[in-house]
Image: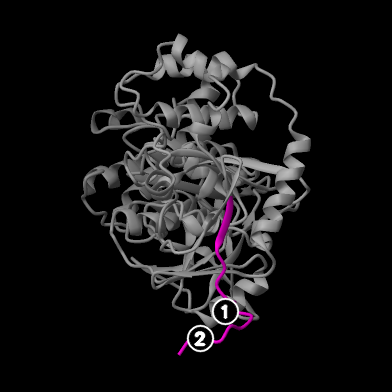
Amino acid sequence: MAETPTAATPPSRPIRFVLNGEAREVSGAKPTTTLLDHLRQTERLTGTKEGCAEGDCGACTVLLCEPDGSGGIARRSVNACIQFLPAMNGRAVETIEHLGRDGPTKLQTAMVESHASQCGFCTPGFVMQLHSAWLTGALGDRQSVKDVVSGNLCRCTGYGPIVDAGLAIAGEPVPDTAGEDAALSARLTEMEGAGVFAYEASGGRWFTPTSVDDLADTYAAHPDAVLVAGATDVGLWVTKQYRELPLLIDVSKVRDLMMIEERQDKVYLGAAVTHRTARQVLASIHPDLGEMLRRFAGYQIRNAGTVGGNIANGSPIGDLPPCLIALGARLFLRKGDDLRVVALEDFFIDYGRQDREKGEFVAAVEVPRLSDDQRFFAHKISKRFDSDISAVMAAFRLTFAATGDGAVVSEARLAFGGMAGIPKRAKAAEAALVGRPFDAAAAEDAMAAMAGDFAPLTDMRASSGYRLKTAQNLLKRFQLEHSGVATARIAVIGPDALEEVA
């Protein structure tokens, strides 16, 4: 018997979007069909390539356009290989074929003149990424161009000419498209339709609510659904693990989850705020947070991945949770009409287990700002600088109290990723610091105590001994920086470099 449509289970509608300026309507494609597969196999737009199928290489980069809420258009580059087709409803997609429709652009000409294309496989992705960055004002000096292509790989090692091509257009004026953007925004809004978007095909279902109340109702009615935002994790469940996901709820259009509220003593971030958007806000708390997010995956992943998603997936090597735990962040969880607040560190129970009930979702995170008596440190250790997973992620916050003999540590929060099955504080090391000046002796005692806090795993990224020694040395680095001893920041570190931070 067919399910009777309700407010939480509306009738299925076709996916309606704009592709390279032309309207598209899709009804029959499996909900977990990737945008890349649709482009290549159905639309025969084969300029967009499949390299890694996990969002790491950038060969599938396309430009995603959507209404910005004020009558204009917001643009961002994304990896088509892990974006699901129903998420395109009410959005517009531009591929490399659209970029060259009227002949080579200045960027494409610069790529040719710089000899920036070798085997050519990665070239469309680089061009689309640089084009998107130019449109959004992200191209400036050479370092900014390097940051922009951090999520694109060239296996022919042609990065120098590619960066030169990006620099060649960095100063080019961006055309005024306000009129066209207003028309496209209205067109996409009409395509999206009102209420919860529902799509059903090939035994799978997809829901896209646009308000937090609709999300709560939809999730309560379908508590076994998989929540998806940027699909930077869930997308790999399909492309790499070949999992069947019969029911998904997309939170990427829930306006209430995109809120950012900055107060004097704290910041609130909605769960659907992307890492790219969050970077500027978190960097205002401390520069280390901005630098960490500059190295957080690649540019396209930061454009899609969300703050709430990075927390809710419970990864023991997620880079953001240790930083937020060190700062004393709190998590807001909603189920139906009920809202509860938990300390972020208590949300992580064990590997693969979080304190979240069926039908309950992450709504927002509260991040305290630093007070004048607090010091903060965050550092990521990985084999390469860009687009790499941490071996160890460390984040520390110390609070100091004045005494007759000088300042002593009144509270210590030392949080790590990559050291246990969950993001975790080093409680024994913290206890070794409290009540003492943050000097070399206190740091050495805390480093020794840290051996009782963790028994790290050995895997392809690092050995157990390497992880523990590195975690200890990062605390020593913090102490040296606090005491005024200059230490060069080592972002990419191997075993031979350990003594440099000892």
Does residue 405 show up? no
- Residue sitting nearer the eye, 174 or 339: 174
Horizontally, residue 447 falls left or right of residue 478, namely left
Toward the bottom, the furthest residue is: 1
Which amino acid, mark 2? Glu
Q: Secondary structure at mark 1?
A: loop
**In the rendered structure, which amino acid carries the disc numbered 1?**
Thr
Q: CA distance from mark 2 to mark 1?
A: 8 Å
Q: Residue at x 65, y 81 (%)?
A: 337
Q: Which residues are magenta?
A: 1-17
What residue is drawn where x is 63% and y is 30%?
135
The quadrant of the image that shows the N terminus is bottom left
- Quadrant where the C terminus is found in the figure: top left
Please provide percent x and percent y for residue 455. 26, 57
Is 312 above or below relative to 182? below
The spot of residue 398 in percent (x, y) is 54, 49
Overall secondary structure of the magenta stretch? loop
Query: What residue is shown with label 1?
Result: 9
The answer to whether residue 474 is visible is yes
Q: Residue most toward the top?
A: 113
State yes or no: residue 4 in magenta: yes
Looking at the rendered structure, the secondary structure element under dot 2 is loop
Label whose residue precedes the other's in the sequence (2 or 1): 2
Q: Is residue 442 left or right of residue 367?
A: left
Q: Quick one: label 1, few (<14), some, or many (20+) residues within 10 Å?
A: some
Q: Which residue is mark 2?
A: 3
Which label is found at residue 36?
none
The percent position of residue 201, horizontal first and vertical second, equals 44, 69
Which residue is painted at 62% across and 55% down in the image?
A: 90
Question: Does 434 appear above or below 22?
Answer: below
**Tags 2 and 1 in contact by the CB under 8 Å rule?**
yes
